Amino acid sequence: MQGLSCGTSNIVGVRFAVYPMADNFVEIIKGALKDTDTSKVWMETDDVTTCVRGRSEHVFDVAKAVFVQAAKSGTHVVFNGTFSIGCPGDSEGDTYMSENDVRLNEEASRKEAVEAASHFALYPLNNPDYMQVIADQAALAEEHGTFTKGVHYASRLDGDANDVFRTLEEAFVRASKSKERAHVTMTAAVSANSPSTKNK
Amino acid sequence: MQGLSCGTSNIVGVRFAVYPMADNFVEIIKGALKDTDTSKVWMETDDVTTCVRGRSEHVFDVAKAVFVQAAKSGTHVVFNGTFSIGCPGDSEGDTYMSENDVRLNEEASRKEAVEAASHFALYPLNNPDYMQVIADQAALAEEHGTFTKGVHYASRLDGDANDVFRTLEEAFVRASKSKERAHVTMTAAVSANSPSTKNK
Ligand SMILES: [Ca+2]
């Protein structure tokens, strides 16, 4: 899809973590990062979360790749993060906005068949029409075939991880285009290999 | 602190999960739920997240308790969730708003000494003054002694888990009182027992 980024404006960020529910979680996370090409994004990690910033295409490409590469082993893994655009005063990492739109991890992510379930929610800030923006993106997810149902405070998606992340990205990008210089955030929990009985 | 809930209005909810990074994660989660009294909240769990709703006091009481009871063993555990108030059309669970304000898990949570680090962010919806509301709550966290620094898209808190959750609750409640019938959400990742070197 067409991204948000033109020249040096509209930097997108995500603050996230990937949680492998396993004793060897450090090894799984390090392996996933090693298998992900992060050269087109600004990235900073501390002991709580990781922040990735750049063009929307590359932020979603990297977020999906880290999740898929961690989940491909079959371990129960959850991605949990908040995407953001338009936060006032935000400029660090702007240099990465000059990257082209070729996604570095798409091919590798497409090779893995990871079933995913997600709860996501959009928060268009400073927008009186925000409830309509949210409703429009839930309708979009239905068109994608990934939408399962609404739950309290969120929408549920199910499907291949590549399809789930495609819906997340498109919902976020479309919501960001709903208003000039929009400030929009989107939370997403994406789970793979859960031992729980699915309750769709 | 004084809660938000009077009679049957202003129900608060949180959609969250607790992630123990261990092979026996199911056992840890089940143990934490067993050690938490959830009788004053509406609660629903699926394979991705858990939703808890009721008076603000009890929603925060239960969220903290599940995290603390899961973390007390020393396993690396992360709480990741989004608190919400004022979502239009939201009524399920209203019956729980008639509970009194006595917190059922506070005493047990206070007994555990769990060091926690958190990234949190407030999203006041449909409010042109939202950036000021956010700045005011970061200032509040400084008064509490839990604020460490701002990071991209979030504020970092460090301290005993009880103190960290107290700051989260007060920031959320105060932001919710900043406007009539406010719709406010707050994301929080809270980590304990991380093996990573702290980068405060
Ligand atoms: Ca301790």
Image (cartoon, coloured by chain):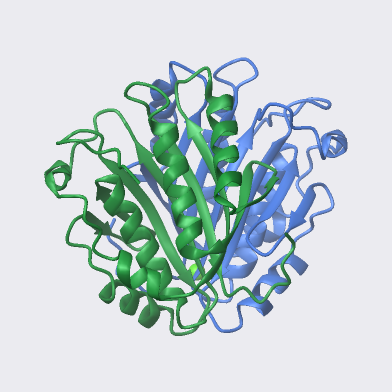
Chain colours: A green, B blue
Q: Is residue B150 visible?
A: no
Q: Quadrant of residue B89?
A: top right
Q: Quadrant of residue A83?
A: top left
- Of B112 and B83, nearer the camera is B83
When the figure is inspected, residue B73 is found, relative to residue A146, above or below; the finding is below
- Of B61 and A61, nearer the camera is A61
Looking at the image, which residue is at 60% across and 38% down?
A139
Residue B102 % position (x, y): 79, 42
Looking at the image, which residue is at 83% across and 27% down?
B8
Looking at the image, which residue is at 73% across and 65% down?
B33
Q: Quadrant of residue B26?
A: bottom right
- Of A159 and B194, nearer the camera is A159
Residue A159 % position (x, y): 57, 62
**Numbered circles on residues, count:** 0
When the figure is inspected, residue A156 is found, relative to residue A32, above or below; the finding is above
Residue B152 % position (x, y): 30, 43
Looking at the image, which residue is at 63% across and 61% down?
B48
When the figure is inspected, residue A92 is found, relative to residue A47, above or below; the finding is above
Quadrant where the image shows the C terminus of chain A: bottom right
- Of A14 and B153, nearer the camera is A14
Q: Is residue B54 left or right of residue A123?
A: right
Q: Is residue B79 left or right of residue B131?
A: right
